[in-house]
Image (cartoon, coloured by chain):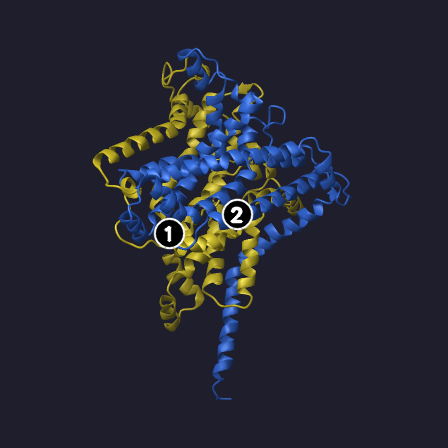
Chain colours: A blue, B yellow
Amino acid sequence: MTTAPAPRKRRSALARAESLQALGFASPALVGLALFTALPVVLSIVMSTFDWPAFGERRFVGPDNYVFLLTQSPDFWPAVRNSIVFTVLYVPVNIVISLALAMLIGPRIRGRNIFRVLFFIPVVTPMVANVLVWKMLLNPQGVFNGIASSWFGVTLPTFLADPNWAMIMIVVMSVWQGSGYNMLIFSAALEQLPESVMEAARIDGAKGWTMLVRVILPMLSPSIFFAAVMTVISSLQVFVQPQMLTGGGPGNSTLPLVMFIYTTGFKFQQLGMAAAAAWILFALVILVTAFQFQVQKRWVHYEV
Amino acid sequence: MRSETTTHVLTHKGGGGAPLSNAGLLGGEPSRLKDAVAHLVVWIGAFLFASPLIYAFFASLKSKDEIYQIPPTLFGKELRWGNYLEVFTYGPFITYILNSFLVAILGTLVVLAVSTTAGYAFSRLRWKGRDTVFVFFLGTIMVPAEVLVIPMFILMQYFGWVNTYQALILPFAFGAFGTFLMRQFMRGIPFELEEAARVDGAGPIRTFVQIILPLTKSAIAVLAVFTFMGFWNSYLWPLIVTVDYESLGTLPIGLASFSTQEGTRTDLQIAASMVSMVPTTVLVLALQKHLIKGIAMSGMGGR
């Protein structure tokens, strides 16, 4: 009765107590994630196999939603194309500009934190506000065309109503909006470049272009890869810019996949069809990301 | 898939030494001329970048007709500061702002509470199945919001939460990102600090509150900013889950309300857009040191 418990037994009792405490700490997150992520994911898979109107009778249709989207829906493939076109145009421009900005705003620039904040402001501003500002600029009566016509006598194209220009302007606006974010990531990475390697390269006579291409970019490649992966994922999910700048038009020339999902689900009330389209988008995101991870071996250097 | 690159950034601390100079970054001697050129380029770049917002600010002080006038002017006939007053009296704009603050602040508090506690459990406490559960956690980061919004809407209908504040706040407050960030950060805190407290008889709750949380301040600041921003700027979900915009609309939805069937009050809409930028800009200015440090530390940020 008075014997002390064996050390092993005490340890396991302690371990059990710690497990219980851990469960207490983790349970809000676990319950929330189960309820608001895991459950919706399961529900979404189920929904995608149903004809599921917002109101009224639901009917199991198996793979019909997917088949319809892939073979018959008039807007689905154009939406896939638009999302891909946006991504292909947007990501490289974003990466190049944000990298150039990060390299330019180094420690010797006076007030560099203020510049960084300045480039970061559009990132933190509500996207809707950014879009409204650009809509005003791009209006045929707006400042771009105003300057062109009154100073140079040139009439610019109607940017947002022209099928070719509309997508370009969505990209331009998005680059302005989003580059500040990757700029901060690259700034942080640049500040962590190992001075020893830089010094060695300098002693070996590397400078200018050689220094950039042979030394700095390889050392930054993990950050560039990371930024590229994240930016591609978010670009394939573009929604607010086309929704507010062009409404997906003219025609369906700037209608991306997420907007297609939104209109299918909440305007045309076909929730099952929209869920199926969302899963196709997810598959596309996974495919593209997996491809990037495959290709990274060729250009990303992890060890210094 | 995030952890791979992140761990790299986390462990990839530079070799010390003098900070790199941008003029000398590409090698060669730093010189006054190069410095001057670099400054000039930065100033031009910054001006080009800022010009849409500068122009928008002056446009917000014009009348509706003057904004769309050819040839364009920077200053209108008069600076109509009254536009900013009118924004607040045009429709329920005050309500939109208050809703946005309420949702963003409460949402941020929920995210911070959930992420710090779970991050603690995943980084400092030992329990069976911890790493398996964590992998599952990370997996959910890959599920895009677009996949979630449709079933989430059904779920909200089922709960009877459509058009409520809890529907604006809770569904997207349990993402794994915050927990992941906290776990990564807390793992770096030396165990000796905690052991000393344990030996003194502090339980995990006291250790968490008095030792771990104070040491996690900068990560908490980063998560707070990104979460606040996320809620403040979010558009798709509020658009879907609220019906009665007049009373439950948030700011991004309120901005759209200046466009009606009778036309668009561009002057007010642009002034309101300027107003909507203020809180997040102030937040970023106030916490910029933490932010840059936090991004460096984690190599990422929330959405």
Residue B103 makes an appearance in the image: no
Q: Amino acid at mark 2?
A: Val
Q: Amino acid at mark 1?
A: Ser
Question: Disc 2 is attached to a residue of which chain?
Answer: A
Whether residue A264 sits left or right of residue B283 in the image: it is right
Q: Which mark is residue B218?
A: 1
x then y, percent, for residue A256:
60, 33
In the image, residue A241 sits, relative to residue A14, either above or below, namely above
Observer-side mark, 1 or 2, equals: 2
Question: Disc 1 is attached to a residue of which chain?
Answer: B
x then y, percent, for residue B284:
38, 41
Residue A114 makes an appearance in the image: yes
x then y, percent, for residue B140:
57, 52
x then y, percent, for residue A295:
52, 47
Q: Which mark is residue A295?
A: 2
Q: Residues within 10 Å of mark 2 (few under 14, many from 20)?
A: few
The residue depicted at 39 percent of the width and 52 percent of the height is B297
Farthest residue to the front: give it: A204
Q: Residues within 10 Å of mark 1 (few under 14, many from 20)?
A: some
Determine contact: label 1, label 2, CB under 8 Å.
no
Decide which of B202, A211 is in the foreground and name it.
Answer: A211
